[in-house]
Image (cartoon, rainbow, N blue to C red):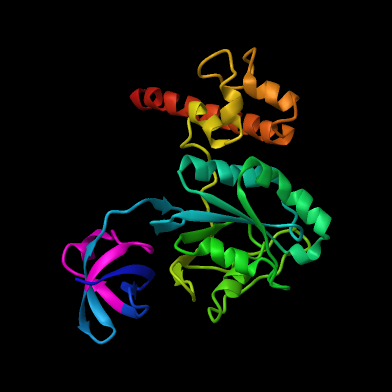
Amino acid sequence: MPVGRINRIIGGFYYISTEDGQIITAVPRGKLRRTDGIVVGDVVDYELTAPGQGVIEGVHPRRNLLKRPVVSNITQVAVVFAHKNPDFNYLLIDRLLVMLAALDLPALILFNKTDLVDPQTAIENTEPYRRIGYTTLCTSTVSGQGKEELLAALQNETTTLAGPSGVGKSALINMVVPGVKQQTGAVSPKIGRGRHTTREVRLLPLPQGDGFLVDTPGFTQLDLDFISPAELAACFPEFGPAGQDCRFQGCFHDQEPDCGVKAAVAAGAIFPWRYENYLTFLAEVKKWERQRRQQPRRTRK
């Protein structure tokens, strides 16, 4: 039985990218029709009923499932920010990176709109994450800078984009998937951010080689409520070696004495702003944990 990927869902019809690069329109058979259990990104078995038409017979087990946006079988996430217009901030970048680490999703960091800054500024903005170990690229949809490097990073992957509005996610899709003609939006000078121009989830096959780029309306789930305080430090890869020098097992790297992470910050081995962002997130996940513990008591009352 042939196998394909769901690349779009519109009004009860499921569009499947086939292994030979074709697109067929299909509907689920039997119980699949009643479960609403098929999402963009799913690998499905199907049967052709007519040229370009078919019936979905089954859904393969998923590698993962994102709920906001709803898409499955993602292998990496491209975290997109702009060097300027709108200005980026490391706190939001780190929030996304922590979320992805907790979900066991590799991150590719893109600093877009490189044409708006001088080369030295571009290096200063991106070098911290390169030093930490993240794959980081500078791109420009105006000059085409970084296009070939980005295409290489997308090969054999199913990649979704994440980042604030106005940073050029739709323009990047237009750059690497010619002909898709994504609508792009300008950044508002009043509020300093853009408007979301993507309104549905689509799986876009790359024009050369294997791989898909997922076009989504954006990540709407940015809370860290699914991460426990004990898990947070593991979401900061540079904390790992330093954490081995902590006196106490299970150290939260906050108030504890003889903490290897705090010593690494003082020695310049860990960026101070990364540690400050960690403390911000630690307070947040502790708040969520307290709320989870109180919830059963409220239910009993």
Any part of residue 70 in sight: yes
**Percent position of residue 232, x then y:** 53, 32
Q: Which residues are magenta?
A: 25-46
Kindly tell me whether residue 201 is visible in this rendering: no
The answer to whether 126 appears left or right of 57 in the picture is right
The number of numbered badges drawn on the structure is 0
Residue 34 forms part of the magenta stretch? yes
Is residue 207 magenta-colored?
Answer: no
Q: Residue furthest left?
A: 30
Left or right, 287 with respect to 145, comes to left
Where's the C terminus, which quadrant? top left
Question: Where, by quadrant of the figure, is residue 128 drawn?
Answer: top right
- The spot of residue 296 in percent (x, y) is 37, 25
Where in the figure is residue 220, as x and y percent of width and height?
Answer: 53, 52
User: Which corner quadrant holds the N terminus?
Assistant: bottom left
Query: Left or right: where does residue 96 sit relative to residue 4?
Result: right
Residue closest to the eye, 209 or 247: 209
Task: Identify the residue at horizontal 52%, vertical 38% (top origin).
Answer: 224
Answer above or below: position of 224 versus 296.
Answer: below
The answer to which quarter of the image holds residue 22 is: bottom left
Image point (21%, 79%), residue name: 48
Which residue is painted at 68% across and 42% down in the image?
Answer: 131
Question: Which residue lies most toward the bottom here?
Answer: 51
The quarter of the displayed image where residue 94 is located: top right
Q: Is residue 28 above or below residue 178?
A: above
* Residue at the (64%, 64%) spot, across then down: 195
Counting from the top left corner in percent of width and height, residue 130 is at 66, 47
In this rendering, would 284 be left or right of 31? right
For the residue pair 105 and 277, the one nearer the viewer reads as 105
